[in-house]
Image: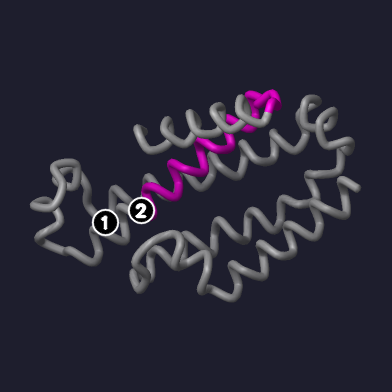
Amino acid sequence: MSISIGFVIRVYAGGFIIGIEITKWLVACVFTLSLFLGFGKRRLEFEALKESAAKTREVMESYTIQKLNILLGISASITIVTYMLYTMAPETKEVQGTDKLIFTTPFVVYGIYRYLLKVQEGRHSGPVEIMLKDKGFILAGILWIATFMLLTR
């Protein structure tokens, strides 16, 4: 939760600095996505450290692989729904100049599920490694950017 709140604060700070209004839906997307990524990172740490996980951080004592998988599944679902609602929100249409951003959703869903699967494989050190080294994730990101740019021009 504290990681996600930190990201939300950064979004507000960035919006303040560049002089743009941050919509509630953007805040919801950032919060849920950072929850998802944070649980993924914890899952990767837990897998890498095994029995010594609880000794590295106090919070790790309350986690198990099963609990983290459930939290990942729930946060993935919430992130997808929040993103879909964001794409259809009147504020988003007003800011982006289109009501068609819902068509970017398949790339977001694929990216979230891809990340989830890669986390559960347990062969990566963290979210950044997955995002920068996995070809499927990179392709989904490129297609999302291209679709977003096409729909908002």
Q: Which residue is mark 2?
A: 69
Q: Which residue is mark 1?
A: 65
At x 59% / y 60%, what residue is drawn?
Answer: 111
Query: Is label 1 in a helix, a strand or a loop?
Result: helix
* Front one among 77 and 140: 140
Query: Seen in the image, is 146 located left or right of residue 126?
Result: right
What span is colored magenta in the figure? 19-40
Query: Seen in the image, is 43 located left or right of residue 98?
Result: left
* Front one among 54 and 14: 14
The image's colour scheme reads: one colour
At x 60% / y 44%, what residue is drawn?
Answer: 80
Say above or below: 142 vs 12: below
Residue kind at label 2, given as amino acid type: Asn
Q: Main secondary structure of the magenta part?
A: helix
At x 71% / y 56%, what residue is drawn?
Answer: 106
- Labels 2 and 1 touching (C-beta < 8 A): yes
Query: Seen in the image, is 126 located left or right of residue 30?
Result: left
Q: Where is residue 2, by image quadrant?
A: top left
Residue kind at label 1, given as amino acid type: Ile
Residue 32 colored magenta?
A: yes
